Image (cartoon, rainbow, N blue to C red):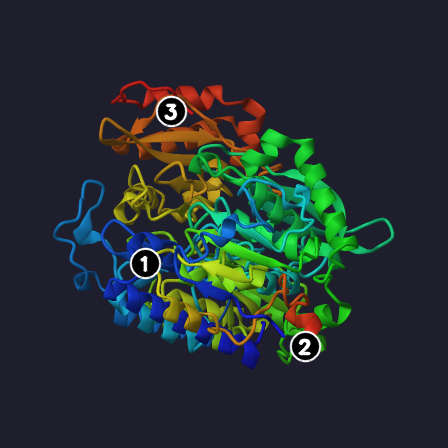
Amino acid sequence: MYQYSDFDRQFVQQRAAQFRDQLDRRFAGTLLEDDFKPLRLQNGWYVQRFAPMLRVAVPYGEIASNQLRVLAKIARDFDHKEDNDISNAVVALADVPSLPDRCAHFTTRSNVQYNWIPLNRAADVMDLLASVNMHGIQTSGNCIRNITTDALAGIAVDEVADPRPFAEIMRQWSTLHPEFAFLPRKFKIAITGAREDRAASAWHDVGLRLLRNVDGDLGFQVRVGGGMGRTPIIGSVIREFLPWNQVLNYLEAIVRAYNRFGRRDNKYKARIKILVKAEGQAFSDQVEAEYQDILTIDGAPHTITQTELDRVSAFFAAPDLNCDRKSADAKIAHILKAAAEDDVEFSRWLTQNVKPHQNPDLRAVTLSFKRLGSAPGDANAEQLERAADLADRFSAGEARVTHEQNLLLPWVRCDQLPELWREARRLGLAKPNIGLLSDMIACPGGDFCDLANARSLPIANTLMARYQDLDELHDLGEIDLHISGCINSCGHHHSGHIGVLGVDKDGQEWYQITLGGSDGSRLSGEAVPGKVIGPSFAAAEVADVVEALLDTYRSHRDERETFINTFKRVGVDPFKTAANAVRVATARPTTTA
Amino acid sequence: MTQQLQLFPAGSLDAESQAAGTLAIANDADPREADLSGVHTVTLNFPGFSDGRAFSQAFLLRRRLGFAGNIRATGDVLIDQLQQMQRSGFSQAVLRADQSLIHGQQLLNQYSGFYQGDAVAIQPRFAAVPA
């Protein structure tokens, strides 16, 4: 993974020092809260329902074992519920006593969040993060956010080119960009380098896909104007092929057009998707004209040189893992076969949690953070440390935070799979449920988040409890279940095969169900928002509704057809009928989105 | 050598902004459509500090149009944005009334360098500093 230079390290330290000064002024009263807010947000500090929330950047998901250990230390030493005065908090949507603390939370944008660190300890936490080159720069605020990619980047068997060097070059370009720190709204960029889009790129403000043209040259297909929230829109292709070395110049043209013309009068209409939708071809023309001016008048100073691409790419070379392929093949096959026959759970783990690798001697292994009794993506201090140990022993000291809120070990030798499995199982991180129903995505919801209309975590817990049986989970097969506590869609309900959206009606929590959403992966097909199946359901009904949907799938499916394909074939009606049949309570009718 | 942003307390250039050779460009206007002949100072306005349009306007004036005169930031100008203003092409900033000029001066030198090129130091770090 990328290794920080003296300059990079100093930069992060100077950022931590800048934040300490701002925090000091805030506490001294010389910096007003309204003026401080965007500054703290651009360092990852929100103020939530009970306490601040810190979002730590994990650029394109790559994290080293020493960084995981510092995250563990922060969880243990700083993430304390009792350090916050919650006596006056409005607790309408939260179950405070049961809320976890002393833990970190993996997000869908491959960052890490904490929910209980008091603001008066914020500067110390930032210094601690800086000690391992970590920070919260641009994890929030109306700026270019942490750039995301595919958890299998650089190791996927279907990869055209490794997106990580480009993600790193774009990270550097976007970090503290003087012109683009106060955009109309947040701005999210995703890159995929593989044939299958595992980065949900069409759902981003800018989605970049690495590809080769007919001449074999490497470039990007550029999409713009995708996003979730209350107006889910799939990004439009604005460029079919952009030479790789022009990507910063082209991004500059897009973001400048957005900064100048994006709406600032209405927060809900301020994302670039609204501008793209309103302007259509005129937006494309504006971007192309600006791009041409950058090339011809400005001299295109951000054209990426081959030297720079080579320099950055060198950091992403595969670690030397001392594989001895010639003698290993037969032996590995034998070990794995014997172990799998010996234990059905190991066999399932191999199927669900272990992915093929560009190096045939290696595998990518997902540690599951989806288990009963914990919120999806939560990891306590102990688990973070043990995961760091696993990364050191089995994955060259590296891990990745995945879009599905798990940790992935990218460099695991095949012959070490049985041993890794035993260790991971001992830690409760080997549940063979990756890609299955219980590997659900959920946002923190009303328990923690100030924006939420309803809780997500109790819904996730109830479904987790109901679908514990591994035989049943494997029979149901691959399915994306996504849960959001409000229309801001942090739980990506729009892209779930089954989406659950918390809504508030008359001060009560209700849940709207969507079906058939897609993130754009091969399993799900073209990216598309799910369809709402009628009025909302009460919290107590959601698990029954999901069960009814799954039973409908099982009664209609052909052989090994997946849920999403059955849904696409038979349509929404049988699912809708089944869901409504378990309805007991009815929300006050309102117009549905 | 980068010219340091000149800081002014609130109200100090009010009279001068009416003088000949000074042009105010509205926050939503395209600076490329402005007539800059005889203009030595352009004022750009921050109606609220979080409205970032003037950063792009300054960039276009300085870089795209090669405007060599003063570019002055007015309105809701906070000391925490001064470095950003300097890098976007501003040469003068008139601070909001409650802002500390002395602290602002210190904040102009918080970083020893940046990654990307800007309106003043045009080359990005990767092009300016050979690996």
Dot 2 falls on a residue whose secondary structure is loop
- The kind of secondary structure element at disc 1 is loop
Residue type, mark 2 in image: Val
A25 in relation to A158, above or below: below
Badge 3: chain ID: A
Where the N terminus of chain A falls, by quadrant?
bottom right
Callout 3 touching callout 1 (CB < 8 Å): no
Residue A317 x %, y %: 66, 73
At numbered mark 3, what does the secondary structure look like: helix, strand or loop? helix
Q: Nearer the viewer, residue A45 or A417?
A: A45
Location of mark 3 (residue): A579
x and y percent of residue A309 in the render?
A: 71, 68
Q: Nearer the viewer, mark 3 or mark 1?
A: 1
Which of the two marks, 2 or 1, is nearer to us in this view?
A: 1
* Dot 2 and dot 3 within a common chain: no
Q: Amino acid at mark 1?
A: Asp
Left/right placement of residue A165 relative to residue A528 reads right
Quickly name the residue at label 2. B129
Q: How many residues crowd mark 1 within 10 Å: few (<14), some (14–19), many (20+)?
A: few
Circle 2 packing at 10 Å, graded few (<14), some (14-19), many (20+), is few
